[in-house]
Amino acid sequence: HTPLKFVAAAEAHDPRVHPGGRRQLSLKAGWRLNGNLQTLGYFAAEMCVGNPPRSFSLIVDTGSGMTALPCADCTHCGHHSAGTRFDASASPTSSVVGCSGCGSCDRGSCGYSVSYTEGSSIRGRLVRDEVHYAVDGASGRTAPTVFGCQTYESGLFHSQQADGIAGFSRAGSGGQGGSLLRDLCAATGAPAIFSLCLSSDSGALVMGGAVPPSLRPAWVPTLGRPGDYTVQVLEFRVGGHTVGSPSDFSHSIVDSGTTFIYLPPTPYAAVRRLFQQSCPWPAGCASRSVKGHYPDDFCYTMEEADLGGFANHSIRLGGGFELPLTPRQYIYKDRPGVWCLGVFDNGHAGLVIGAAAMRGHEVVFDVDGRRIAFLPHNCDAMAAAKAPSLLTGGYGLAGCSKPLTPEPPPPPPSPPP
């Protein structure tokens, strides 16, 4: 399952409406993701849609294909961080997606209904409108995009701070409309490639960038039919020792919408046992043990400097690439002075490489090439627009958000001669 440890949204604020004519953001200013592991459990991008443009905070999820946000007429949607709703009647560029070839019809519009592994569900109707992208250059870029306008939310979708979800799976939305990436590529001719670079409390998303010839990454093939980013796991090493068998790791996926790392029972038991028995304190591990928020949490009172005293693990993936799992990737800060094991029991075969394991890498998803690359990178610096992407070109989803830093004031006028 997907343990997105969301927190309830605060009271709604004024909707985020961006008047026309504001300065177009650069790519670096528009690729930022907000979120964290310990309280929100996700990373979200600001999507700018409609005319006048409005911003919506959407969870970036490589494990699903639907992009959806709340409709103005939704009768069962939560009060999210900004309370923004999409009103098609207020955007002259919006249009209805008709019922031709659609699985279900909702008052003349194509309807959709999606259920998620952890129990949440959404339903509504499909609409089409312009999405505004951040891009380097004098003018911005828009792409007509099909997305879901929700009239019903349940579970975590109803209670989360984020307004909705942006799906980036290989299947797009599985026949229920388009996808952000595919619609952007159709409008711009950009390659079907995107990258995610996550740190503990920020990140970056680049869409439609190109892999420069000089990069030469160690590619990991994605397997199976279109859908999840399924990868082959050749070996899982715990503290240098191989655990589990190939059958334990059938249908292993890379999923940014899953907060932590999920292992099949045997490898999980080995990771938990080592975490409980091998630690950097002379008085023993039990002397620092404390409870977490959930019954299956294993936590210690410790500081960040103690992380170096724990074992390193690794995952050897198809193509021969070895993904390191350092303590910074599999241990997370739950609250001040308390750190917990960010690895959980999947309950069945298969490994889920969630957002925690992706940290510290710019993870490149070459959708049409059916491959993924994990490239070490400073994601904090990239999120703050202080480091470039390893891709060239591309687009940022936050096409109308405020700049990361205030614009400098204009220079004073020159004194008269």
Image (spheres, rainbow, N blue to C red):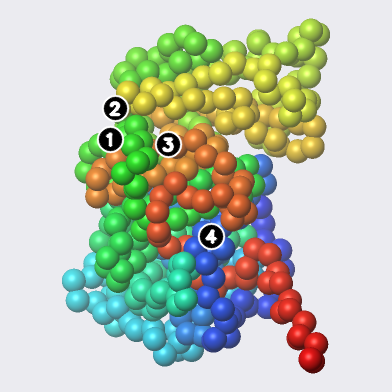
Nearer-the-camera pick, 410 or 291: 410
Q: Residue at x 41, y 24 (%)?
A: 322
Distance from the alpha carbon under mark 3 to that under mark 1: 12 Å
Give the mark, 2 or 4, whose residue is nearer the N terminus. Answer: 4
Where residue 319 is drawn, which disc sits there?
A: 2
**CB atoms at circles 1 and 2 under 8 Å apart?**
yes
Left or right placement of residue 407 versus residue 272 in this view: right
Find disc 4 in the rendering and name its residue: 28
Where residue 374 is drawn, which disc sits there?
A: 3
Question: Which is closer to the viewer, label 1 or label 4?
Answer: 4
Kind of residue at disc 2? Gly
Distance from the alpha carbon under mark 1 to that under mark 4: 28 Å
Kind of residue at disc 4? Lys
Distance from the alpha carbon under mark 3 to that under mark 4: 20 Å
Query: Percent from the top left, x then y, of residue 137?
Result: 45, 71
Q: Residue at x 62, y 71 (%)?
A: 402
Give the mark, 3 or 4, whose residue is nearer the N terminus. Answer: 4
Is residue 41 visible in the rendered structure shown here?
no
Distance from the alpha carbon under mark 2 to that under mark 3: 12 Å
Kind of residue at disc 3? Phe
Q: Residue at x 25, y 61 (%)?
A: 175
Query: Percent from the top left, x then y, of residue 249?
Result: 35, 24
Give the mark, 2 or 3, whose residue is nearer the N terminus. Answer: 2
Give the mark, 1 or 4, whose residue is nearer the N terminus. Answer: 4
Where residue 221 is drawn, which disc sits there?
A: 1
Depicted 77 relative to depicted 356: above or below: below
**Which residue is most to the front?**
417
